[in-house]
Amino acid sequence: MELDSKIMEKAATLIEALPYIQRFNRKIIVVKYGGSAMADEELKRNVIKDVVLLKLVGFKPIIVHGGGKEISRWVSKVGMEPRFVNGLRVTDADTMEIAEMVLNKVNKSLVSMVNELGVKAVGISGKDGQLLRCDKKLSNGQDIGFVGDIKEVNPKILFDLLEKDFLPIICPIGFDDNCQSYNINADDAACAIARAVKAEKLAFLTDVEGVYADPKDKDTLISELTTDHMEELLNSGNIGGGMLPKLQNCLDAVLNGVSRVHIMDGRIAHCLLLEIFTNKGIGTAILKAGDDHFYTPDEK
Amino acid sequence: MELDSKIMEKAATLIEALPYIQRFNRKIIVVKYGGSAMADEELKRNVIKDVVLLKLVGFKPIIVHGGGKEISRWVSKVGMEPRFVNGLRVTDADTMEIAEMVLNKVNKSLVSMVNELGVKAVGISGKDGQLLRCDKKLSNGQDIGFVGDIKEVNPKILFDLLEKDFLPIICPIGFDDNCQSYNINADDAACAIARAVKAEKLAFLTDVEGVYADPKDKDTLISELTTDHMEELLNSGNIGGGMLPKLQNCLDAVLNGVSRVHIMDGRIAHCLLLEIFTNKGIGTAILKAGDDHFYTPDEK
Amino acid sequence: MELDSKIMEKAATLIEALPYIQRFNRKIIVVKYGGSAMADEELKRNVIKDVVLLKLVGFKPIIVHGGGKEISRWVSKVGMEPRFVNGLRVTDADTMEIAEMVLNKVNKSLVSMVNELGVKAVGISGKDGQLLRCDKKLSNGQDIGFVGDIKEVNPKILFDLLEKDFLPIICPIGFDDNCQSYNINADDAACAIARAVKAEKLAFLTDVEGVYADPKDKDTLISELTTDHMEELLNSGNIGGGMLPKLQNCLDAVLNGVSRVHIMDGRIAHCLLLEIFTNKGIGTAILKAGDDHFYTPDEK
Amino acid sequence: MELDSKIMEKAATLIEALPYIQRFNRKIIVVKYGGSAMADEELKRNVIKDVVLLKLVGFKPIIVHGGGKEISRWVSKVGMEPRFVNGLRVTDADTMEIAEMVLNKVNKSLVSMVNELGVKAVGISGKDGQLLRCDKKLSNGQDIGFVGDIKEVNPKILFDLLEKDFLPIICPIGFDDNCQSYNINADDAACAIARAVKAEKLAFLTDVEGVYADPKDKDTLISELTTDHMEELLNSGNIGGGMLPKLQNCLDAVLNGVSRVHIMDGRIAHCLLLEIFTNKGIGTAILKAGDDHFYTPDEK
Amino acid sequence: MELDSKIMEKAATLIEALPYIQRFNRKIIVVKYGGSAMADEELKRNVIKDVVLLKLVGFKPIIVHGGGKEISRWVSKVGMEPRFVNGLRVTDADTMEIAEMVLNKVNKSLVSMVNELGVKAVGISGKDGQLLRCDKKLSNGQDIGFVGDIKEVNPKILFDLLEKDFLPIICPIGFDDNCQSYNINADDAACAIARAVKAEKLAFLTDVEGVYADPKDKDTLISELTTDHMEELLNSGNIGGGMLPKLQNCLDAVLNGVSRVHIMDGRIAHCLLLEIFTNKGIGTAILKAGDDHFYTPDEK
Amino acid sequence: MELDSKIMEKAATLIEALPYIQRFNRKIIVVKYGGSAMADEELKRNVIKDVVLLKLVGFKPIIVHGGGKEISRWVSKVGMEPRFVNGLRVTDADTMEIAEMVLNKVNKSLVSMVNELGVKAVGISGKDGQLLRCDKKLSNGQDIGFVGDIKEVNPKILFDLLEKDFLPIICPIGFDDNCQSYNINADDAACAIARAVKAEKLAFLTDVEGVYADPKDKDTLISELTTDHMEELLNSGNIGGGMLPKLQNCLDAVLNGVSRVHIMDGRIAHCLLLEIFTNKGIGTAILKAGDDHFYTPDEK
């Protein structure tokens, strides 16, 4: 019986995945998902499929998502003007109300997509199970409204949902002792959660390819960044506004028990799968100085 | 040492609660909460306190809530006109989007209030854990949009949350196989859930005192209604529009394993507590014909 | 619908109990019960009701009881003379036999009363499960017979019974390696058991209102006594014979992990309930110096 | 190296026990213990050692004991007169009080002896865990006081204690809904308990060798009695007063799930051990008609 | 960033596996492995990799292996002559001894290969945990030695090993009550085990492509065979000697709770993976008449 | 009724075993079994019976066996010459293959014998569950083939089998990272396993009576040897070749958590039983200096 070479390649691809599946078995992987990758329905479906596959082969993925563009759209819709200070949304009471509504709607739409693939998801916010307790975050000393600074993560609800085999999907809304809601930056939330659950991996699906040594030169993409080179890079002055806090978060995660953080381009179909299951590195990996390069095991 | 009589009465009240606490120990009680009782912040806090107390003394309460007035407010806010057919909201795609956002917002505000009292709540919709699978519901054969008819309840997520000691709060949004969201009548959702978890009790906190034999005569409040008198009443022509489907739901619940259904006036402070813990009956109780009157145990 | 103010007060009382129920959820509370409060059948029933209520709302009560008066009655009944040295019963072999019989009888009568309220109790002595291992206790160097000094507490049987949802009731009989029975002072037993199970609270239901700064002046009842004031009090010379070892026991308990000890008047109906569930302090509370006054939480 | 034949016989005896140990592994064996065998301290210690050995090799023994002689002694001690009607003790309130005290004392002395051998026993009465619920038993229609007729056995406490690896020791005191204590015939209690826990074996340690076809002829001891021969024997008129209800109990047990009942002479040292572990049958075995003779497995 | 099409195909292949991974999650798959596929080291490694991958993505594979050729080699090696009657090995005591040694050696070599891939295997025979109890199998009434006919499968050891996350590997040696070893046909063993554990799938890795309608015409390979066509085929006279008992086994398995049996060519690299994870059917599938074709789910 | 003295002695023997049964309850006992004791079928059956009895009375025995003589027999059978260097078998690839086959055969024959007595055994090698990871062992720097030096013991498989109530039987074959098999000295394996599972006792059934102070004088058998006298003995020059590594192993075990090691003559019927259950010490016990002589508890 003849089997065409394409079929044989399929087998090879599955076998290639074996050491990675083994390595991440029962490990928690936090996926931060936002930006353009969320706008395109096709891309969204691809991301969800990737995460569902991770779940099915034995990993324990958790999704943390944003929804900034959709919030702005709804703020405008009710006749208000979205305002930002230093890249942070000015969040008065009305905006906060809209933000919470919109983020929860986005949350449940992701739940539905996972449902459709036959895996049970549960969508929660940082209020549920008292997951994300906040204070008000100031922007250079300025009060910009109900923007939250995470004070305490209570991961019990996450461990409980994972134990019961659900896929948790989290929208970054927090609370304080006075029942006030806060809008939290999704990167901050993902990072704090990854630390609290001691995730093996934290992956940021973003709108950029990764970290550039020189953002103006697309050929300077850094594929691996250790913590000791990070400082150098942060001091180079080459890192722009949006990337700066993200890198700070990555550094924080890696220094606090998350084995590896990835910044990758969520607009590439199945980037998550390719990063995890193949030798082809996607985007930038941030890891502790001295960690060995165990992510590309040689097949025996 | 003299203790004033007021203190002694307090002790008496607590002791009076003993047989009720005993009776409902580890039993599931579904509380449908909506209407005017939700509009008043003070009443809302009272309801939440009651449910939290039920949780703390060993019951397993589940809240199902509505939010119709708030939905209408937001529909208007974005410049649309709320429309109803036979008392059911006409729910086009835009309205559905708003309804889901608003109900989730209400949901999380209830979660916050429970949090504040030191009990951990988890707010979910009917999408989470694939709780409420729907079809489209027609109104006398007429398509009125994404109004859901519950086809299947999957209570696993509820049992899991109860086992992990959370208080589940549910907003009545469902889903179908095509990832479409549906707005479900909160009474329908509460009833279907009470049946699926085999609740001991289902309590409707409404805007009326209970069921009247003659709605025009406030002196005809029925305090106990058995299933065999129900039919008679339904045929009397005295039951008005809003009450009709509610009674149908009650009948359905009682005939399918829920021991007792209560319709009570959510505007009375702590009505839930008084109904459950004292001999003072509140509103109307619906029970199976032949069931004994075990809810008012004589103290030994 | 009008609800009279009395009904509303009932609701208020139940709601008032909420923070206390929350605070003691799944905590162990050891109740030492003896003296006059045991002689009156009505009071006895009240105490038992209180403990059953504690059990039903989620606490884990353990009863340790005495029975001195009943022992004396039976010693006399068989024609012997009860004898005491320094307040300790001289316990020869015959007296020991009677004491054990009487205490077990008292024990089982308490079990019956709990049974009757629908909660399952198990009555054990310090021999069962090798709970209380003893040596002979001397009274100022004098051998006064089989009076036990607790050498070792083996709380496994208590944890097992609590886990299986029983209410343990303990009579203070111990054993030694030679199969000899010992009569143990019930205060000593309660204190040793509270320490061994790391009880949250130890409550002595006694024949006095509490501790007086000056026992001759009923107006000097101390409602709160911290460990550092205790020494001062013990040195004042104002504390009489019976209270002295009791206070020593209290100090010992508080210094060894029991959060708070209460001395209260068991002759006040439902004193236990009032102490735990209301802001009205009953008797004297003994606590560690520096512990905050968390027992009267302000309602939010 | 020479080993004397005595040592080799020891090995042989242990090996001989192997199939029996295997057969009763994790099986419940109820031992009714009373009469003369309880009066002699040496015999008592032997019985206890046997039961402890059964426990240690993996069986689950439960002891049910009597104490009639000791009760009579104490009734006399307080100046009353023991009275009997048809072999049943007339049990007025005073007698009941003494009976309960004495039986509990006997109970705890057995607990102590087991303790001493390093196994943890828990002594309970039929009140604990609501084990034995009773009605009043009449003697030929005559009220003879608080003699109990078992209405309901609630074995939860026994299963819980066995699960936690305790050896339960039970004294035959029951209760009714009004908190009244009852004295129960120990044979009745043992039989009811054996049925309720579905014991593999029920052994009566008595003052007779077993059942005689002709009680006047000691050579007519019956070593095996099947249920179908039982009736014949009961009708023969040869069975005397004391043995009659005992045989009725045995028949009842065997017909209700207890595999085999033994009546043996408790005055023979280690009779229990010899019966169970050797081919030497002791006393009379009662078994269902048609049951095979599996108790003397041939060694392979 | 450009990703070459090959990389994208890899992602597509992984995603294609998703519905199959989902379908077989926690299902038991028995793999019968023998013949030529075992002779080639490269093929052997491929089969083991496939099974390890199945294990890692959440299935519960069990391997049953043969070793006929290796047995013959060793029989010759010690100077004996392998003999067969009707395709069954004549198994005298000496041959049995060699067969058991050889099969255990093969068994442990498979264990080693699984070990090497980081999954823990446990190799057992049908003696371990009393897995396969046998009688002697006659060949047309003729005694051909210690060839076993399976009388009873005791799958406890398999469930225990699977629960503890081991991969069981079984060699087909059985036992009888007299401690005698038996050589069992590996197909028989695989089939009996698949039935006993209620396997989802039983896959035979053989030396042929599958079942042919006409074995002389390689173009008549049957890709799907339902039980009702089976009889027809068996009666056609076209099925040769070796395939006949195999098909009988398949029929037996499918009629007794195994959802689907596969006969495939073990010499095709990764045939198992391709069969399970792709739409490309390999070999012949045997299924119950009327079963739907759920094995090729359409991707949504 | 008269019971002859022989019967009474049986009872006495069983009672004598009580404190030992108590002491070793749920303790792990590793039995190294090899040499002449394995050659005689009658002795073999006796050893197996002893171990089965240990299992049934609540111990957790593990058997580690050798099979040197049988290996040599098979090496000769295929026309090869067994070779030894310094008492270690020269193990080329062919010899290794035979050794593995023979040891597995011996292993399964022991499994069968345990099966026959009604206890479930599971026979494994050091490859199963990755139990014994090895390196090559040199003999005075000389490569003698695949003789294994244990590098790592992974006892999970043993704990899992014990938890599931199986009796593990282990043959000393190890593996390395390259899938290579190694022949391990059975004494080494038993010792390493006893350490890894923290066995209470390690018993070597050998061909000698025990350790002699002077091997030429059979009257110098040492019945108890503490670790501090061990060195003295090792330095005396009196200890011969075969005993030297065995004593080194014993010392190693006792210093690493095994309470007591026994060297005894496996040719004495039931030596294991006699050693454990009677006051008659058999062979030589090795224990830590300072350990009390708790193995001969006085009966109370």
Image (cartoon, coloured by chain):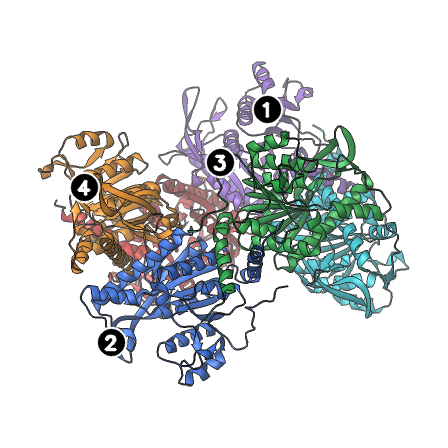
Chain colours: A green, B cyan, C purple, D red, E blue, F orange
Question: Which tag, 3 or 1, sits closer to the chain's start?
Answer: 3
Q: Kindly state the secondary structure of the residue where label 4 is placed.
A: loop
CA distance for labels 2 and 1: 87 Å
Quadrant in which the N terminus of chain D appears = top left
The secondary element bearing badge 2 is classed as strand
Rendered-image quadrant of the C terminus of chain D = bottom left
C-alpha separation, residue under disc 1 versus residue under disc 4: 60 Å
Indicate which label's residue lies in the foreground, 2 or 1: 2
* Residue C25 in sight here: no
Please name which of the two marks, 2 or 4, marks the residue nearer to the observer.
2
Number of other residues with Cα within 10 Å of mark 1, as a class: few under 14, some 14 to 19, many 20 or more: many
Residue behind mark 3: C74
Numbered disc 3: secondary structure: helix
Tag 4–tag 3 contact (CB < 8 Å)? no
Report the amino acid beneath label 1.
Lys
Q: Are marks 4 and 3 on the same chain?
A: no
Tag shown at residue E143: 2
Label 2 and label 4: CA atoms lie apart by 49 Å
